Amino acid sequence: MKWSRLRFAIPAAIATLALGLTACGSNLGGDSGSGDEEGPIKIGAVLDITGVGANLGVPEQNTLKMLAKKLNDSGGIDGREVELIIKDNQSTEDGAAKATTQLIQDDKVNLLIGASRTGPSLAMRPIAEQNKIPLISVAANASIVEGSEWVFKTAQNDNVVIERILDDAQDKGYKKVALARDATGFGEGIADQITAMGKDRGIELTATESFEPSATDFTAQMTKLRSADADAVIIWGITPSAGLAQKAYKQIGVDKPVYQSHGVGNKEFFDAAGDSADGVIAPMGRLLVVDQLPADDKQADVIKAYVDDYKAEFGSDPSTFGGHAYDAWNVAVEAFKKAGTDPEKLRDTIESTTGLVGISGIFNFSKEDHSGLDASALILAVAKNGRWNLDKV
């Protein structure tokens, strides 16, 4: 079975759920995306503002509100106000599907942003596709955009994250890795990718355990990983669960290297993991190490401006998840400036966007690539003293 076909079997169940929650998969009958040239341009966002994904959704919400205010204060787009409508999916697929339906049918939005995590994003996807309205997800799993016509994303794909992890493991001579992964859509398919990509590097996946993002006790999973006797362990999840898993792994007395995914790109990881985080390696965007980037880094100025604006507005540092929302907003705004609100022109314009410098990387979309980022969008960071530090560009 080809890898892409294997991957696409995963979201099919969620897609069926999403369609069942709407008008049996039919077009919702709204005139969203009708290409009206008057009145406000409407952007609808569906985010995990409450529930297990709140650590991701809240900074995303903050970022979108900040950018919408800044844009409208400067005159909007060609004199038109940009109306931002945000809905909380409560970190559920059901909630994401319902919110998407409401935004299209009732609010008649021109473009959608969301969701914060993979599962809710996959629930939004078939509704956007059926109604032919552009959707920009801020979640990670590559299946969100595989084969899509109307769905894009700004978070780095999980497959490029795995590529960076396995390349580093190969450089260090590791032959066996073990995996503890999030049991939701974010972690689906990760074991298969490690197995497939590891073969080319002489690396074998020897054990896989899973955990719910709401879990607080990881003793059983970490004990089994210890028994696997791998050269290194990969913990794939979001905060706080990934941080708690890290803490449990250290508490059982194992001293093997640990890789985490880009789902831990915020301070909440360190709040949960404490000192056990020291030494953890994770591929992630440049935001959290912006003060350590080389002077000639092409993203540095954009990232610094975002960090300064966010801290001035909210009194705290932004996370990489807020950065994904920043990128989704700017991809959308740049497309509206060029294409107006005609949905097909809007989609085609996003597909032709290249060289757009963002927080998560430099975006080069195409008809075949609705992610727009490759492995160069990631650096390797190492955790030390409660923060991420640049290890390797």
Image (cartoon, helix red, strand yellow):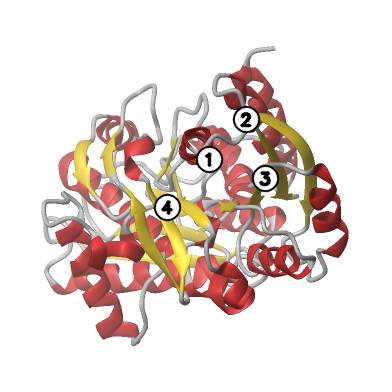
| Real-space CA distance between mark 2 and mark 1, rounded to the nearest whole angstrom | 9 Å
Proximity of marks 4 and 2: CB atoms separated by less than 8 Å: no
- In the image, 17 versus 385, the foreground residue is 385
What residue is disc 4 on? 284
Kind of residue sitting beneath label 1 = Asp
User: Residue reaching furthest top?
Assistant: 1
| Real-space CA distance between mark 3 and mark 1, rounded to the nearest whole angstrom | 9 Å
- In the image, 304 versus 279, the foreground residue is 279
Q: Toward which corner of the image does residue 42 lie, by quadrant?
A: bottom left
Q: Secondary structure at mark 3?
A: loop
Sequence-wise first label, 4 or 1: 1
What residue is disc 1 on? 158
**Is residue 319 shown above or below 334?**
below
Q: Toward which corner of the image does residue 246 lie, by quadrant?
A: bottom right
Neighbor class of circle 3 (other Cα within 10 Å; few <14, some 14-19, many 20+) is many
What residue is disc 2 on? 193
Kind of residue sitting beneath label 4 = Met
Neighbor class of circle 1 (other Cα within 10 Å; few <14, some 14-19, many 20+) is many
**Is residue 236 shown above or below 126?**
below
Give coordinates of residue 89: x percent, y percent. 62, 63
| Real-space CA distance between mark 3 and mark 4, rounded to the nearest whole angstrom | 16 Å
Proximity of marks 2 and 1: CB atoms separated by less than 8 Å: yes
| Real-space CA distance between mark 4 and mark 1, rounded to the nearest whole angstrom | 11 Å
